């Protein structure tokens, strides 16, 4: 005869089903694969960053103001995502929805500035085909931007489920996993900020 699982009252809801625990474990493994992907893209860019050909040096076109705004938006979104999970742990659906919607709006703001930046680069003659350095740049930064876009769409669908079903082991595990994904993208951005933008500006202006 099957026995119902018993849990410590302090166990978060997303860990109270075997499926939820396995999904979270599986997502950590997935993030390991994502880490390998971005590590490869970073290595490729760092090898190619000096190969500008007839195109402009990569650091020449970077705008400090746009870069700082993008960084502020994305890092703030990581903070609001954390607040959303805190509200989830407290059982507050409304609080979770409010903070996650703010997170998504910040993510959309980040994407808007990134698209504006890419359009500016193209207008200045720097495209993915201009040189090896710019190819590496657009592939690395564009891949991160694509991941942010997927994250916004994914979290939006989860929030729709939460608005209908409230908190269950299934919805809370999805929320927790999507929050991990969002934090991962913020960490990747910190490396992009340092290895691509900051290094590029120092090399060009130094």
Image (cartoon, rainbow, N blue to C red):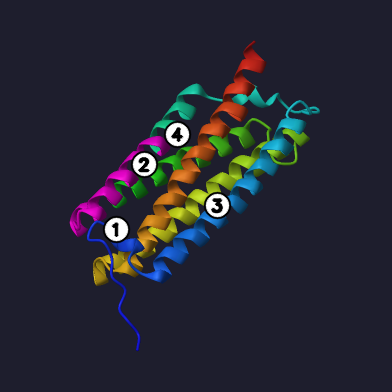
Q: Nearer the viewer, mark 2 or mark 4?
A: 2
In magenta stretch: residue 177: no
**Residue at image mark 3:** 31
Write down the residue under mark 1: 12
Q: Establish if 71 lies above or below 16.
A: above
Instruction: Tell me the crowding category of disc 3: few under 14, some 14 to 19, or many 20 or more residues within 10 angstroms, Cα based.
Output: some
Q: What is the distance, in whole Å, between disc 3 and disc 1 at their CAs?
A: 21 Å
- The residue sitting at 33% across, 39% down in the picture is 79
Segment tinted magenta in the rendering: 74-99
Q: Nearer the viewer, mark 1 or mark 2?
A: 1
User: Whole-Å distance between the Cαs marked 3 and 4?
Assistant: 23 Å
Element at label 4: helix
- Who comes first in sequence, dot 3 or dot 4? 3
Foreground: disc 3 or disc 1: 1
Disc 1 to disc 2: CB gap under 8 Å: no
Q: Which quadrant: the C terminus?
A: top right
In front: label 3 or label 4: 3
User: Looking at the image, which residue is at 42% across and 55% down?
Assistant: 178
Q: Residue furthest top?
A: 206
- Secondary structure found at label 1: loop
Q: Which mark is residue 70?
A: 4
Question: Residue 106 at what x, y percent from top left?
Answer: 36, 43
Taking depth in this image into account, of 193 and 67 the one nearest to the observer is 193
Q: Earlier in the sequence, mark 3 or mark 1?
A: 1
Indicate which disc, 1 or 4, sits on the residue closer to the N terminus.
1
* Label 3 SS: helix
Q: Residue at x 75, y 36 (%)?
A: 130
Gap between marks 2 and 4 measured at Cα: 11 Å
Q: In this picture, is 138 found above or below 55?
A: below
Q: Residues under labels 2 and 3: Cα distance?
A: 19 Å
Report the quarter where the N terminus lies: bottom left
Q: Main secondary structure of the magenta part?
A: helix
């Amino acid at each position: 005869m099957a026995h119902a699982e018993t849990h410590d009252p302090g166990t978060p809801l997303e860990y109270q089903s075997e499926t939820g625990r396995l999904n979270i474990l599986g997502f950590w493994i997935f993030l390991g694969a994502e880490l390998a992907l971005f590590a490869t893209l970073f290595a490729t860019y760092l090898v190619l960053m000096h190969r500008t050909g007839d195109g402009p040096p990569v650091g020449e076109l970077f705008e400090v103001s746009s870069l700082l705004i993008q960084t502020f938006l994305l890092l703030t979104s990581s903070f609001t995502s954390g607040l959303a999970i805190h509200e989830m742990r407290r059982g507050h659906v409304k609080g979770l929805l409010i903070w996650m919607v703010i997170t998504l709006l910040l993510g959309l703001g980040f994407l808007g500035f990134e698209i504006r930046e890419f359009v500016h680069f193209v207008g200045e003659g720097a495209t993915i085909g201009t040189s090896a350095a710019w190819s590496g740049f657009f592939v690395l930064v564009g891949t991160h931007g694509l991941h942010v876009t997927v994250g916004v769409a994914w979290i939006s669908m989860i929030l729709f489920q939460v608005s209908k079903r409230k908190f269950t082991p299934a919805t809370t595990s999805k929320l927790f996993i999507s929050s991990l994904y969002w934090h991962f993208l913020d960490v990747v951005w910190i490396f992009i900020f340092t290895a691509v933008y900051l290094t590029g500006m120092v090399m060009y202006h130094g």
